[in-house]
Each structure stands twice: as structure tokens, then as C-alpha cells.
Image (cartoon, grey):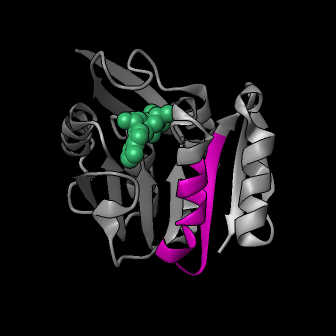
Amino acid sequence: MGMIIARIRGKEYRFLTAPGVFSWRRVDKGTHLLAETAPFDRVESVMDLGCGYGVLGIVAAREMGEGRVVMTDINPRAVWLARKNVELNGVEDVVEVRRGDLYEPVEGESFDLIVSNPPVREGLEIVSKIIEEAPGHLEDDGELWLVVRRKMGAERVLKLMEETFGSAEVAARGAGYWVLRAPG
Ligand SMILES: C[S@@+](CC[C@H](N)C(=O)[O-])C[C@H]1O[C@@H](n2cnc3c(N)ncnc32)[C@H](O)[C@@H]1O
């Protein structure tokens, strides 16, 4: 087990982490860039797909103030840690953590914003599914924001987003990562 203290958008966060979850020793640089740049302050509902120990959804909840955040992950350990971190950061009134595959835990639900640092290492097929099934879970004018390491296929992911959404753009770049945005 470990405890990470991170400063994001000028606020301090504490994250309980453990081996067996993504980037357990420190907040991933891509995750940090997405957390700093996603438009949490102008939305009312957010899905954090593949939440790990919970950085994106918890930052979303603090930035939104009011609203609804659903965080999901397939890994039970990640879900357990994310639930602890929701309590640790005092956002339990806003956030729900659910275990399951991709959009299965949010069947029939839509959000203003879907954010994800997708499991690129597991193959492009899973990233394609995240993109192709996103419109079915976005409100009108909803947006999908992903972060991908440039050398891990960010350009290819941008193309997939363009194919599904009609347009997409690089919203931010830093530390070798691209934050990609597609309008709903
Ligand atoms: C790159 S990590 C990002 C974790 C966290 N969002 C962060 O930024 O620290 C991708 C996450 O996706 C989860 N994941 C992998 N396959 C999944 C699936 N089919 N459905 C839901 N989550 C999945 C992994 O367990 C992992 O926590």
C-alpha cells in the first residue's frame, strides 16, 4: 500500500494506492495532464472509464462542486481503492464507483463528459470500443476526452475519434502525451 499526495488545479489530493493497479507509485503524467485540462467546471455529469485508483473522477467531483460522477473499472482492486479514495477526498456525495467491463456498468445512462486514460497496452481494439460506444453514453453536446502517449498511438486514436465523431482535436500536449477531445 502507498499514499500519494498530488496537487492538481491548485488543490491537494490524497490517493491510497497499491501494487497491481496502474501507476501506483505516482500519478501518471498523462492522467495529470488530462485532470488539469478537462472541462470539469462546465459540466454536470462525468464518467471516468477505467478509473484505476480514482484520480480523474475525484478531481472532476471537486471541480464540479455539484453533479454526478460515475467511475468504473474492471479490476476489483482498483474499484476498492477508488472507493476508499472517494471517501478520503470527501466526494462521496457526488461519486459512485462501479465494477465492470467498459460501458456495461452504465447501461442506459448518459453523461456530459466521458474521460479516460484508456488501457492502450491491452490493444487498440479496446480503445476503439471505448470510442465507438461513447456516443451512446453522451448527452447532446457531450464530449469524449482521452489521454494517450504520443508514441503509444495517439495519432491513430485521434483518427478513430474523427471517424466516429466527425471531428476531433488535440486539446493539450505535454510530457509526451496528447489529450484528445471529440465533441458529441
Ligand atoms: C491506463 S489505466 C488508467 C487508470 C486511471 N484512470 C489513471 O489514470 O490512473 C487503464 C485502466 O483501465 C482499466 N481497464 C482495463 N480494461 C478495462 C475494461 N474492459 N473495462 C473497464 N476498465 C478497464 C484498467 O484496470 C486500468 O485501471
Q: Is residue 94 left or right of residue 23?
A: left
In the rendered image, is residue 43 in sight? yes
- Quick one: quadrant of the C terminus? bottom right
In the rendered image, is residue 50 in sight? no
Q: Is residue 165 left or right of residue 139?
A: right
Given residues 82 and 21, the one toward you in this image is: 21
On the image, the x and y values in percent for residue 64 come to 44, 63
Q: Is residue 5 left or right of residue 184?
A: left
Residue depicted at 58% across the width and 46% down the height: 125
Q: Residue furthest bottom?
A: 140
On the image, the x and y values in percent for residue 146 come to 62, 49
Residue depicted at 28% across the width and 34% down the height: 78
Q: Residue furthest front?
A: 125
On the image, the x and y values in percent for residue 109 come to 36, 76
Examine the structure image and report whether residue 141 is included in the region drawn in magenta: yes
Given residues 12 and 88, the one toward you in this image is: 88
Place residue 165 in its image quadrant.
Answer: bottom right
Given residues 78 and 13, the one toward you in this image is: 78
Residue depicted at 36% across the width and 21% down the height: 4
Examine the structure image and report whether residue 36 is included in the region drawn in magenta: no
Q: Is residue 70 above or below residue 49?
A: below
- Quick one: quadrant of the N terminus? top left
Q: Is residue 20 above or below residue 93?
A: above
Place residue 108 in its image quadrant.
Answer: bottom left
Q: Quadrant of ligand 1?
A: top left
On the image, the x and y values in percent for residue 166 come to 79, 72
Tally the marks. 0
Q: Which residues are magenta?
A: 127-147
